[in-house]
Amino acid sequence: MFCEMCFTRGGYELKCVSCCAHLVLKTRPDKIRAQAMLHHIQKYPQSPKRGEILKIVQEAINAGI
């Protein structure tokens, strides 16, 4: 689920939609924490749009990840 750049850096990159989705997925099943994580991500000026992140989150949930 990580992009190559983020994987090699050993952390999360808030410009990367995959890393942002992974951060949100780590909060499951706590919806309040998921909302807080999305709010925090959106504070970063170059972060992906909320809809982009949630699309990947939903795809991961549907795939059973």
Image: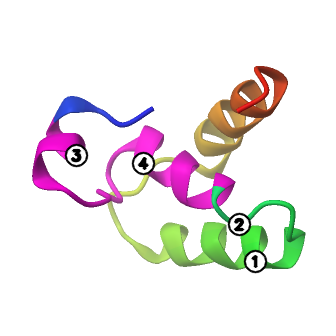
- Dot placed on the residue nearer the N-terminal end, 2 or 1: 2
Q: Nearer the viewer, residue 54 or 28?
A: 28
Q: What crowding class fits label 2: few (fewer than 14 Cα within 10 Å), some (14-19), or many (20 or more)?
A: some
Residue at numbered disc 1: 33
> Which disc, if any, is residue 6?
3
Residue at numbered disc 4: 19
Locate the N terminus by quadrant. Answer: top left
What whole-number distance in Å separates the C-alpha atoms at marks 1 and 4? 16 Å
The reply to whether dot 3 and dot 4 touch (C-beta < 8 Å) is: yes
Question: Disc 4 residue type?
Answer: Cys
The reply to whether dot 3 and dot 1 touch (C-beta < 8 Å) is: no
- Under circle 4, the secondary element is helix
- Dot placed on the residue nearer the N-terminal end, 1 or 4: 4
Question: Disc 1 residue type?
Answer: Arg
What whole-number distance in Å separates the C-alpha atoms at marks 4 and 2? 13 Å
- Dot placed on the residue nearer the N-terminal end, 3 or 4: 3
Q: Position of residue 2 (x, y in %)?
A: 36, 37
Residue at numbered disc 2: 27
Does the magenta portion include 13? yes
What whole-number distance in Å separates the C-alpha atoms at marks 3 and 4? 7 Å
